Image (cartoon, rainbow, N blue to C red):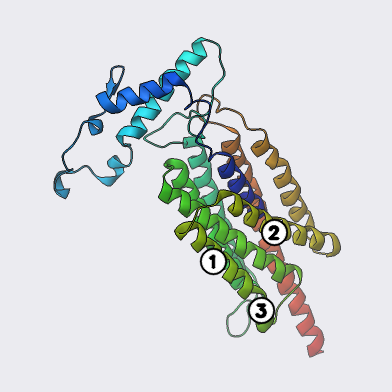
Amino acid sequence: MAVHYWTSLFLVLSCLFSISYASAGDADPNYRTCVSECEISGCVGQVCFPQCNSSSSAGPWYIQEPLYLQWQKWGCQGDCRYHCMVNREKERETLGQVPVKYHGKWPFKRVLGIQEPASVAFSVLNLAMHFHGWLSFFITLYYKLPLRQDKTSYYEYVGLSHIYGLLSMNSWFWSAVFHSRDVDLTERLDYSSAVAVLGFSLILAILRTFDVRVEAARVMVSAPILAFVTTHILYINFYKLDYGWNMIVCVAMGVAQLFLWARWAAVSRHPSNWKLWVVVIAGGLAMLLEIYDFPPYEGYFDAHSIWHAATIPLTVLWWSFIRDDAEFRTNTLLKKSKTKAK
């Protein structure tokens, strides 16, 4: 769908721009010295980290801390990097210098161990809006619109819309996890879920904009895309996480479906076309937030997190369009059936 084209494309672009580990901050000799000394001594100033000097095992499970407390803690290297970054940024602020990135990321302030709290909060809100949209779509179909005699919906894209909703919620869930703690596993899960929803959105865009309703034709359209997306996910997870190639794949799928939705909105007489145009145009304007990257305000709100916030109303509007489309198609089919009956 159009809104998730922008979501996935921006996610890929932002991840691509953040993968460089040779940022100005971590190239700073003072910062590097601080981290090296911390990993040996286990302390940054008066703050010390027991995990840096721990050589013993964690002990039996019944004396370990609960997982929700362990999640708030980082390893020795993570804590050393964070506190050295905080101290170095205080020094830079005193000298009147602007913030710089460290290991590809802006100097965010942690909250309860969460690496990027604003992006996590907005990802969760996006997840909630997708759940609300999907649930309202379900209620509209089965409790507000007329059903066939076998209690199935008249809307031909009901199953595809349900899958889209589930994949979207899965994508935002892993986005929240990834921004909570950026490690190799969460990064791969975030990338994979974004590619999955983007590939399925392309399938749905083709089927809806070309009004493909014959099951055999749907299979012929979907099979090659599903095969390619599955192969790509396996490639980036088990062979090589090639950021450049992943960006090319996602941009190609995203541009293709954006073109399809724009063409369809231009030629169709759908009563809710304006909602589709708003989502496409507003999503394009929101892209400026990814291009004009700036340091986090007060250590929390950077351009990427604000973009996460911008997608929340677009998600609400998009699910509203899907509900309108279900109502439009249902009424159209009912009118045709009544005309044939006469």
Which residue matches tag 1?
A: 231
Q: Residue at x 57, y 32 (%)?
A: 302
Q: Which residue is mark 2?
A: 321
Q: Quadrant location of residue 263? A: bottom right
The reply to whether the C-beta atoms of the residues labelled 2 and 3 are less than 8 Å apart is no
User: Residue 61's x, y, as percent?
Assistant: 17, 49
**Spatial separation of the CA atoms under disc 2 and disc 3:** 27 Å
User: In the rendered image of this protein, does residue 196 appear above or below residue 117?
Assistant: below
Q: Is residue 35 left or right of residue 161?
A: left
* Residue type for callout 3: Met
Question: Badge 3 is on which residue?
Answer: 220
Whichever of callouts 2 and 3 sits on the residue coming sooner in the sequence is 3
Secondary element at tag 1: helix
Is the residue marked by circle 1 packed among few (<14), some (14-19), or many (20+) residues within 10 Å? few
* 6 relative to 275 in the view: left or right: left
Q: Position of residue 129 (x, y in %)?
A: 56, 51
Amino acid under label 1? Thr
Nearer-the-camera pick, 331 or 300: 300
Q: Going 48% across and 28% down the picture, which residue do you hit?
A: 107
From the image, state whether disc 1 or disc 2 is nearer to you.
1
Residue 88's disc number: none
Q: Quadrant of residue 85?
A: top left
Residue 290 shows in this picture: yes
Q: Is residue 35 above or below residue 207?
A: above
Residue 131 visible at all: no
